Amino acid sequence: MTVQLSNYSLKRKSALMQPQEQIEQLQSKVHQLEQQHREYVQKQQELIGAIARICESSLQEIEALRILVYRGEAECRRYLRSLLKNQRKAG
């Protein structure tokens, strides 16, 4: 009888612990995603600052932001590098 009760208690405890473990895993994943989001926002803010420093005209800024939105960070950085290269040639 004791073995049956013990097995029942273990199964019940296991069934109760499984949702708790799932909650902990989800909380960990949420924390990880929040950290990734913070890093993403910080990189975007740095890139927008670079756009403001590098671009010499409003049209260049608009183009850089358009590239950032539609083509992504790498393409925007490539565009900014090309602007810097052209500025050095002209300067």
Image (cartoon, rainbow, N blue to C red):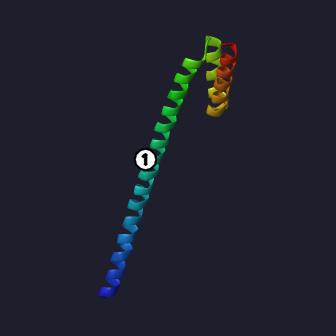
The residue at the point 32 percent across, 82 percent down is: 5
Q: How many numbered callouts? A: 1
Instruction: Tell me if residue 23 comes above or below residue 41 in the rendering.
Output: below
Residue 38 appears at what percent x and percent y? 46, 37
| Point 38% across, 60% down: residue | 20
At 41% from the left and 64% from the top, the residue drawn is 18
Q: Give percent across and percent down for residue 15.
A: 40, 68
Name the residue at the bottom extreme.
Answer: 1
- Residue 70 position within the rendered picture, expressed as x and y whole percent measured from the top left: 66, 28
Return the x and y of residue 10 as percentages of the image width and height.
Answer: 36, 76
Q: Is residue 79 left or right of residue 17?
A: right
Return the residue at label 1. Answer: 31
34 and 9: which is toward the camera:
34
Q: Would you identify the image quadrant in which residue 17 lies? A: bottom left
Asked if 37 appears above or below 46 in the picture, the reply is below
User: Which of the pair 79/38 is nearer the observer?
Assistant: 79
Where disc 1 sits, the SS reads helix
27 shown above or below 18? above
In the image, 79 versus 40, the foreground residue is 79
**Residue 22: quadrant of the picture:** bottom left
Q: Camera-side residue: 27 or 63? A: 63
Tell me: 8 left or right of 41.
Answer: left
Q: Quadrant of the C terminus?
A: top right
Name which residue lies at 55% across and 18% down: 53
Identify which amino acid the numbered label 1 is placed on: His
